[in-house]
Amino acid sequence: MITPMKKYSFLVYHQEYEEFLEKLKEIGVLHVIEKKTELPEDIREQYQYIDQVEKCIKFLKKREIEPEEGSSEQNGEELFNEITSLQQEEEQKKHSLKALQKEINELWNWGDFSLDVIEKLEANGLNVRFFIAPSRQFDPKWHHEYTLEEISAEAGNIYFVVIQKEDEQIDIEAEEVKKPKKTLSQLIESKKEIEQSIEQTGKRFDQLAKTAVPALERYKTSLIENLEDRKTKFNTSSEAEDKLRVIEGWVPEEKEEEINKYLDETGAVYIVSTPSGEEVKKVPIQLKNKKFPEKFEVLSELYSLPKYTELDMTPFFAPFYALFFGFCLGDAGYGILMAIAAQVGRMKMKKEMKKVMGLVFYLGIATLFFGLLTGTVFGVDLYAYDLPFYASVNEYIEAHGYEDVNYVLFYLSLILGGIQILFGMVLKAVNEIMQFGWKFAVGTLGWIILVVGMVAIYAVNEFAAVPMETLTPAIYTVLIVAGLMILFLNNLNRNVMVNFGLGLWNTYQTVTGLIGDLLSYIRLFALGVSSAILGYVFNSLAVAMSGSIPVLSILIMVVILVIGHSINLFMSGLGAFVHPLRLTFVEFYRNAGFAGGGKPYNPYRKLI
């Protein structure tokens, strides 16, 4: 559900304003209303600076070095400046290293030589010139015509030098290259020095990764708190010739007592109101659900928060998502592993991760349930054994002429999809009534009557053996009532003919959409089958490749099983996470008429 909010407007004397803000920050329940959309340049620059600090923290964490307790006296700003300076230096060194490597590659075929010797030759009037010529163009007679020395031959080219005497004319059809300024050994030595310097920088980064992260995070938090102070002051209005300050914000109803107590003690001037009209579009969203759906709020936030006037979809999609995840993964063994891992994680991980571990636990329980239902435990098919429950299911399947349990699972996926779609339509009607009134929900209610009525008639005919001829009046009644609501009464504030035109168009979209949405749920069955097949394949592979050596064969089998089922758990688990998420955010949200776009509740509070 969405936490109800109250709007608070404060009138504060300018000399008491700083103290008032500090107390509001300590209470930490007021979400300040941003009245001005265009932030000044200095605040935008502060955002960018905080982003750089965050990138610096991520850079250290990516080094994957076990952190140690850092010194409490470390200065976060100094550490940040040091790291950014080292990063810039390292980047420059890497560019220099790249340029050096290019020079080394160019000089490699010339070998190592002495520049001192070349300088002495030039001092005595002898010019040393460097040439490259394709092997097929190199003329051996040049050896007799000039003082020439071949250095090397590589990739179809000959590298050679010619010592030119004063006033000597040289006519050689070859590419002349510039005389090297450094020798190969000098370049290699420079490269080693830069590599050692980069290595030292890396060691410093490793050292900082061990101790500097807490100080940097404290520094980032202080920057964020300072930024919030500046934004709050920026969104404060000045009145009465700058003698009064006006600030407005939102407070959850459950937190009213806490802030009212302070306001009444100080005698501050304030007004409390309930959001109405256009204001409801700006109310921040705080989700508050009970134990089970609360764990699924992390999924809701991946897509979008609801508007203040909408239903919070979290408690409504949570049971379906858990069932769909279990359907897709569908292995009781994997479900047990997930549940155990989640419980261990909840004891060892930080507070912010406990909700995620709670989600994993519930998904593990759903996987365990569906694994037992489908008869799969670590790729072992329980239906192949004469166990009481599974033997009864097999008898039922054979008695009704079905091939195997997969036939039932296929239709189960469609049934679950149909239930969720219909449930979404009911929620859409509720949403429309809440936001616009019952007159806007007549069309949606018509579709609900049509779908429920036809399903009920089919069920009576199929399971109660009532002839369709007897049910014909009921069919006509449902069609007439639903048709009138869908085509002519879909919006009682519009003209009937306009309703009819829009009703026809909406009918086309709804029918085609419902069919496509329903077929999308087949993926639940497909993913569940693929997970079971992969588990079975790895089991067969482990048995086939283990050999017959008593101890070694068991070790080989265990290794293959562990690796194989780890791969299957990862791949199938990823599919089981993503595809139910798609069914939720596309099929379910669309049929529920979810609009979203809410902004999260972010109170002005102390962070450190």
Image (spheres, helix red, strand yellow):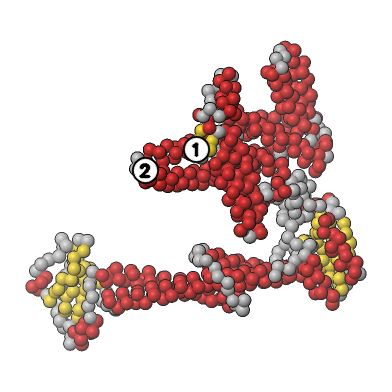
Query: CA gap, disc 1 to disc 2?
Result: 24 Å
Mark nearest the camera among 1 and 2 is 2
Q: Residue at x 58, y 18 (%)?
A: 399
Q: What element carries label 1?
A: loop
Q: Residue 533, percent across and down?
A: 48, 35
Q: Residue furthest front?
A: 550
Q: Nearer the viewer, residue 560 or 514?
A: 560
* Contact between labelled residues 2 and 1, with CB atoms less than 8 Å apart: no
Label placed on residue 550: 2
Pointer 1 local density, CA inside 10 Å: few below 14, some 14–19, many at least 20: many
**Residue 21 in the figure: left or right of residue 130:** right
Residue 397 visible at all:
no
**Residue 524 in the figure: left or right of residue 189:** right
Q: Which amino acid does label 1 sit on?
A: Gly
Quick one: label 1 or label 2, which is nearer the N terminus? 1
Q: Which of 67 and 550 is in front in this view?
A: 550
Pointer 2 local density, CA inside 10 Å: few below 14, some 14–19, many at least 20: few
**Placement of 409 over or under 311, stated as above or below:** above
Label count reads 2
Q: Which of 605 and 369 is in front in this view?
A: 369
Q: Which amino acid does label 2 sit on?
A: Pro
Residue located beneath label 1 in the image: 379
Q: Residue at x 81, y 74 (%)?
A: 19
**Residue 529 in the figure: left or right of residue 273:** left
Instruction: Identify the image quadrant of residue 160.
Output: bottom left
